[in-house]
Amino acid sequence: MHRGKGMKFVGDSRIPAERKPNIPKDYSEYPGKTEAFWPNFLLKEWLVGAVFLIGYLCLTVAHPSPLERIADPTDTGYIPLPDWYFLFLYQLLKYTYASGPYNVIGAFIIPGLAFGALLLAPFIDRGPHRRPTKRPFATGFMLLALAATIFLTWESVATHDWEAAEQQGKIVAEVEIDKASEGYKLYQENGCINCHGDTLQGGGAAPPLVDSGLSKEEIAEIAVNGKPPAMPPGLFKGSDEELDKLADFIANLKSE
């Protein structure tokens, strides 16, 4: 071939391109290493997803979501509890270095570093190997994150006051309260409203006083001597006549 000369290709748009049918590639030369996306791989994904979806639906039917009473923004004694998948963050905020004046560290900095490292993991560890032993960074980070999440979730469940939470969230029947009565005024003056609420439905460690099941004498005894561990003695400061009126008011609080 002489200098300056070469092979030239000429195309003609009037000639239709040869279209081949969309046939999956033959992967028989790579046995056990790969497979066609459609329908082999996608069908497996659908089957696994269907199994998990049916299992999740069965759990929701067998264990419906627990409902609590209507939220009361004035109830300062309410003990909050997030859903189970946030319990590890909830427990993290209980520690000294992540709560109070360091709340920003526990709420933003520590979770931000953890999730940021998770996002950067594919860019930091770019090795072609698939075995966990040959990818120490990715394997170590995931094991550390998994262990921390399990530990914090377990600690949150183990240290939560479930008995008080059940009482504070219990749905109780509504009852009409005469807030102009002398008994209710004594209830306010002696500080009972601070723990039991203005509707006497309780909150935090304080039980509801509606449908308490206590007699008039028992209520008067508790008002004077308290009830450990939540209620100390000596809270009632009135006379015997006022104590009788307060006990009678609480004992007659019955739901409809």
Image: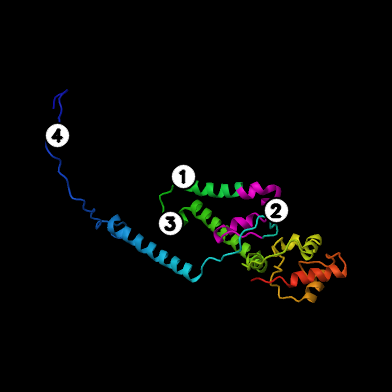
Mark closer to the chain start, 4 or 2: 4
Q: Pointer 4: what residue?
A: 13
On residue 131, the disc is 3
Name the mark nearer the viewer: 2 or 3: 2
**Segment tinted magenta in the rendering:** 79-107
Amino acid type, mark 3: Arg
Q: Name the residue under label 1.
A: 123
Label 2 packing within 10 angstroms: few (<14), some (14-19), many (20+): few
Cα separation between marks 1 and 4: 45 Å
Residue identified by numbered label 2: 96
Image spot of residue 179 (x, y percent): 73, 61
Q: Main secondary structure of the magenta part?
A: helix
| Marks 4 and 2 close (CB-CB < 8 Å) | no
**Where residue 117 appears, x then y in whole percent?**
53, 47
Relative to the observer, which residue lies in front, 201 or 3?
201
Residue 226: percent from left, percent from top:
81, 69
